[in-house]
Structure formats: C-alpha cells, structure tokens
Amino acid sequence: FQQSNSGSSVSAEDQSLRRAIASSILKEIVTPTLNSPDLMKKKQLEAAAECLNLVLVQIGYLGKGGIGTHRYDLCQALLNLQNNAVSVMDEGKLDMTATLLRVLSLSLGFGELTPACKYSLEYLNFEPEASLRSIVSLYKNDVNNKLDVHQASLMWITVTLRSIKTPSLQQEVSNLVFNILSDLCFEKEDTSLLALKIMIGLYDCKISEGVGENDLERLIFSKLLKSFAKHWQITEVDDFLVGCFNIGYEAERDPWWSDHLETFLECCTRVKMDVFSATCRENTSTLITSLSITSKRWFAFRFLCLGAKVSNPLHPDVDEDMLDRETQSRLSHWKMGMIAEEIEELEDDLLTVFEWIPAKLMVEIESWIDDHSYFDNPHQGTTISRMLTWLVFLEYLETAAEDDVRNRISFSAYGNITGAVFFMLSSCLIFLDTEKNGKMAKDNIYKIGDVLREQEYVKVDCLAKTVLFHTIEVFPTLSRVWWEEDCPKSFSSIVSAFVQAKVAPETLSRELIRIQKSKSLGEISVQGSIKSREVTAIYLQDECTLSIAIHIPQNFPLRNAEVDGKKTLGIPENRFKRWSLQIRQIINNQDGTLLDALLLWKKNVEKEFEGVEPCPVCYSVLSVKTHDLPNLQCKTCGNCFHSSCLYKWFASSGKNQCVLCQQPWNGTRIQ
C-alpha cells in the first residue's frame, strides 16, 4: 500500500484497495486503541499511533468528515489524548505525561518506525497550543531529570512547531528547547536523532531567529558533533521494515543519520553559519578521527571545511608554550643545526600557522613523514583520510592568506619543514588513474567544492587528482622542487601534461578573477589573457607610466614565470630590474600569487618614490616575506638592510661583515 513516487496516476482498483486497507487499519487497530488508551500498554499504544501515521503518510486517506466517520472518531481520540496529557501535566504525573506525549507525537508524524510527516496537524486541523503551554508550565517546576519526559516533550514540540501561531508561545517553546537540549546527554542515538529533528524544525520554521541563544546553540552544536564522532554507529534495520516502508536503507552507504544530518547541515549553513562554523572549528580534534570511518568521513570533511572558513584567527595571542607537545618536540628537532636567526624565522612561521590551524590538525600532518612503511604498502582508507585532512589544511591556508598575504609564505615554510607537501604529492601518484599509454585518464578534475557537494567523489582515485591539482595550485614553488627532485621519472611527463592541461589554465583563470575583484590595487590597471598567458599591469605614479608584463609558461609552476618591462619612461633601468626581480621572486620562489606579487610591487614603487632606499641584498624596499622596511643600519657605511636578508647573507657567506663596505658588522636596529 505504498504511494507511488513516480507521479503516475493510481488506478481506481488500487485506490479502492488502499481505502479498504486504510479502513481496516483504522477500524481494527487505531480507533479502538486510541479511543480507550491503556497507559500500561505503552508498546500497543505506540504501535497503533505508528499505524495511524502510516495511513496518513503512505495512504493519505481518512475518508469524509462528520459524526460517525473514521475522520471524526480519530480527531476526537487525538483531542482526548491531548486533554489527558494537559491534565496529567497539571497534576505532575510525569510517567503518564511521557506516554501520552509520545503517542500524540507518533500519531501525528514524528516518524520513529514509519516515515515522518510535517503536515498531519494541518491536514486534521489539530490545534496543539494547549498542550504546549502545559509543557512550558511543567518545566517551570523541577522535572527531576526525567529523560523520558524530556524526549517525549521534544518529540511533541518537533511535531507541532509549524502549528504554533502565538509569537510569545513560539519564543517560550524555543527557549525551552535550547534549555532541555543543553542539559541532555547525546551519547544515545535516539537522543541525537531527536536533537537533529527539533533543531531542523526550529530553523526551518525560523522560530529561533532573534532569540539570542548563541552560547546555548554552540553548546548543542558541539554536543552533536562530539556524539557524531564518538557514538553514532551504523545499525541494522529489519528487512521487513525496509520492505514495507521503502526507506531505501543501505547500511554502508546511508547510515541512519544521513538524511537528517544533511538537512541539519543545510539549515545551519543557511540560518546559523557563523555560529556553526566556529563550533566546527572548535571540534576539529574530534572530527579528524571520523575521516578514517567510511560512513562518517564525508560529513566530517564538510564540518572541518566549514571550520576552516572562519575568518578570524583561532589563536590570536599565540606563544610557543601553547603548541602541542608533539609539535614542540618536532620543533626542537627542526632547530638542530640552525643559526639563531633561522631558528627565530622558523618559530615565527610555526606560530603564524598555529594562529589559524587547530593543534590536532598540525600534529596529524606532521606525523605523516614518520610513516616510513606507508609507500611500501599504502592503505586506501588511510590515504583517503590523509587526503581529506590535507584539503582541510589547504582551506585553512586560503582563509589565512585572505586575511594577510604574508601568511601564505609562513604556510609554505611549514609545508616544507614538515615534508607534508612532498609526502602528499608522492601519495597522489600511487592512486592516479592512468591509461595504458602512460597518460592520465581524461576524466574530470573534482575540486574541493565538488567533493563537498557530492559524496561519490570521496574515492581515492578522484581525491588523488583533486589533491594533486590543489597542492600544485597552492604550493607552486614547492611543487616544482618536488617535480624536479622527487617525482619518479616514469611520472614526470604525466605530471607535466596534467599541469599544462588542468592546473595552469585553471590557476591563471582564478588569479585573473581574484585580481579583478581586488580593491587593493588602487590605480593599477591589470589585463590578462588565458590564451596568450600574459598579464599586463599599468601603474601611473608621479606622471610616470609604469608597465610590466608577466609571462606565465604553459606548464607553470614547473617552469618559471618571466617579467618584462614596457613603457618605463623616466625610470632607471636598474630600478626596473629590481622591481622585476621582486615579482619573479614572490611568484617563482615564495609560493605567492599574481595578486600578491602585484600588491608588493605597488607598495615597493610607492616607497621608492617616497625616497626609501631598497635593501642591497634583496633589492626590495619591502621584505618579500614580512613586508617590513629595511630595519638594520650599518654604522660604518650607513646602508640599511632587512634583518632576515642580512642574517641569510651572514649564513651563506660565512662572514660577519657588511654586504657593501665589507667591514665587521656593527649595526643598529632602526624603526
């Protein structure tokens, strides 16, 4: 007696059969049980209630109204149940309250063993506000931590949310829901499912808007995420129920939480995006473990990516003592053999990353390089988990770089010192889908956004190309070094062809869009062509027309970008060569973007026209990494240097002398 989902008309014979079945269910089971409810027979009452819901949802037939009809009798029975519930709540009889509210909920569409329905109350013109007011009054007294009362109350509120018409009652009910949920333990799956359903109802009906329960919401979100990661399991569903209710349950593909969690996630991102995203970030340590569980990894990945999009730093007031012990231990190892200035730079980079990245995520990424046996026998499940973790890391990087372009260089240094970039690129090669001729299969490249939208892309062959694409896109310099030094010769041409066909065009297209949207370029006019792979920037400064052309090779970043000068009238050649070197350095050697390079060029030009002399080591006024002005001055010759440039000069030359006057260094720090 299932309704057809195809939209095809039902024959008169089928309609007659359905009505006969519905009539028998109502006459023999539902009406006599609900008309004279025996509260001692809870299971019998609940079964009758589910049967009524089944008739409403699957058959949709109650016949005509009027005294003596099935419809009239059932409406009266339900009204009597509500009146009884109000009476026992007024008398403080909690056990009876729980039973009656459960029966009402199951009768009118909650859907525990049968499909849920939102519109049963509307269909029957049922008014629930009397019982809801009694629930609100009941909770003004001590409910004695009665879990069954909490659950039954939440069930009935879930069913009736759409039918609350009094604004003050809506607010009271919303506040009550948050207070109950904040006190409940979500370890049991039925409680978690109930919480999902009622939160969906609140947001779907927009009842919680403006109530201002952000702190309680974060608490509830956090409890749900922790329960999802630690307690939710795939459960077996009785074959009889699967057959009767056609719920399409497949244990490995569609866990019990799948549809509800999908709807919940959609509601949260639509109504409570900021609060939910911040909560996801706070629960990173818990969620990362779910990436290794097949049934949970897609949702866990989506939660983690939401957390990565929070636009403010996670640890704004960071110091080294806040780092995880494992990271601190690795830092001590990385410092070995470094000079003081290199150690300081490494610590600054690590703390910059830690400002944005949860500690557990850093520990996970740093541990990969120690898995010495991985490449001997790579496990698909482990690889998928690590690839998803890496994509989350790249999302954090993009968020941090949007806040400050200098963060990109620190993330690049971190990716290099941990060996994570090389490790991940090499991992991708193992699972790339290549054809017999040695070329990569010509199917689509699925971006991070595609993986977030479609669970079917969370497969190792799809992820291998996704991770390869985004890693080369985000870490162009490190990817070129890997390709030149670590990429197996048998894959060298495959990777090069992949970069030329997929990565280079997409990256340039994205960069041109980013440049067009930027409000920081001011008077710089930028034009670019994907076909010619040339980007031209024109800048008017003090009646001088400055123009540069950046040529992007077809297989960039495996080959370096070049910079040419055009219309540089009034500008000394050596000065323009310095500017060209700055742009090449940030694009080819610092994992910077075209926009990063143009913005740094603009700032350098402005400072030089203000009379600030460039650093004699890097030929740039502003440090490529920190964007600081030269801050160390030689007392002998008076020239100024960036401290990082000078210390690198000391380390590479083996001398502690001024770069220009060659006298023993005797300098002072300037503001």
Image (cartoon, rainbow, N blue to C red):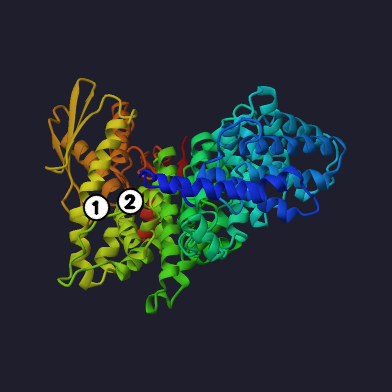
Of tags 2 and 1, which is closer to the observer?
Answer: 2
Task: Identify the mark at residue 335; answer none if there is no mark.
Answer: none
Instruction: Give whichever of 243, 164 is nearer the camera.
Output: 243
Location of residue 535 by image quarter? top left
Q: Secondary structure at mark 2?
A: loop
Q: Amino acid at mark 1?
A: Val
Q: Is residue 523 above or below residue 432?
A: above
Does residue 486 appear anywhere in the picture? yes
379 relative to 480, above or below: below
Q: Residues within 10 Å of mark 1 (few under 14, many from 20)?
A: many
Picture coordinates of residue 126, whole percent (x, y): 64, 31
Element at label 1: helix
Q: CA distance from mark 2 to mark 1?
A: 11 Å
461 or 396: nearer the viewer? 461
* Disc 2: which residue: 447
- Tell me what residue is drawn at x 21 percent, y 72 percent: 489
Residue lying at the far top in this picture: please name it.
Answer: 543
Mark sitting earlier along the chain (2/1) = 2
- Horizontal and vertical percent position of residue 460: 36, 65
Instruction: Please indicate, yes or no, whether residue 182 appears anywhere in the rendered image.
Output: no
Residue 356 versus residue 274 in the image, above or below: below
Amino acid marked by disc 2 = Lys
- Measured as percent of width and height from the top left, residue 181 is found at 69, 44
Residue at x 71% of width, y 34% of height: 79
Image position of 311 (left or right of 435) = right
Q: Which residue is denoted by mark 1 in the rendering?
A: 503
At a point 39% along the width and 74% down the height, the residue shown is 378
Does residue 200 appear to the left or right of 339 in the view shown?
Answer: right
Estimate the x, y position of residue 90 in percent, counting from the top left: 85, 35
